[in-house]
Image (cartoon, rainbow, N blue to C red):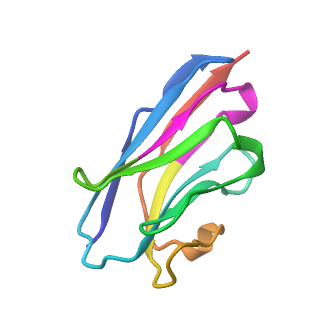
Amino acid sequence: QVQLVESGGGSVQSGGSLTLSCAASGYTYRDYCMGWFRQAPGKEREAVAVRHSIGSPQYADFVKGRFTISQDNGMNTFDLQMTNLNPEDTAIYYCASSHWSVPGTCPFQAADFTYWGQGTQVTVSA
């Protein structure tokens, strides 16, 4: 059973930075997608960044140039480094993963991901 546990959320001022980490365990396959999603109050869950275990990252337009998704295979963790944060980035952030046999690309919809962490709050004040 795959388990994902996020850490690293918190409160920062506009222009600040945070790094979220997702510790993954229980993988039994090599080809998978990992991703970070977020959900603000009253809004739908949206993709922030996704990445295939064998591929390049894909980012939502609203975070390009500010956020970076990375993976540490040795530690079975994947991170989301967030810079130049603004109040519109305030949300609960979730890491997610799913087996995906097509290498190089990942889906950008929450419905396509099977496993989810519990979420971590990110609050950005003006």
The furthest residue to the bottom: 101
Q: Determine the residue positioned at 58% across, 72% down.
A: 105
Q: Quadrant of the C terminus?
A: top right
Q: Quadrant of residue 6?
A: top left
Q: Is residue 62 above or below residue 124?
A: below
Q: Is residue 67 above or below residue 18?
A: below
Q: Position of residue 98 (x, y in %)?
A: 44, 73
Q: Is residue 46 magenta?
A: no
Question: Magenta residues, as a range?
Answer: 79-93
- Answer left or right for 76 relative to 90: left
Q: Determine the residue positioned at 27% across, 55% down.
A: 76
Q: Position of residue 4 (x, y in %)?
A: 34, 57
**Depth check: 49 or 111 in front?**
49
Q: Determine the residue positioned at 41% across, 33% down.
A: 8
Q: Position of residue 18 (x, y in %)?
A: 51, 27
**Depth check: 27 or 118 in front?**
27
Q: Is residue 86 magenta?
A: yes
Q: Quadrant of residue 50?
A: bottom right
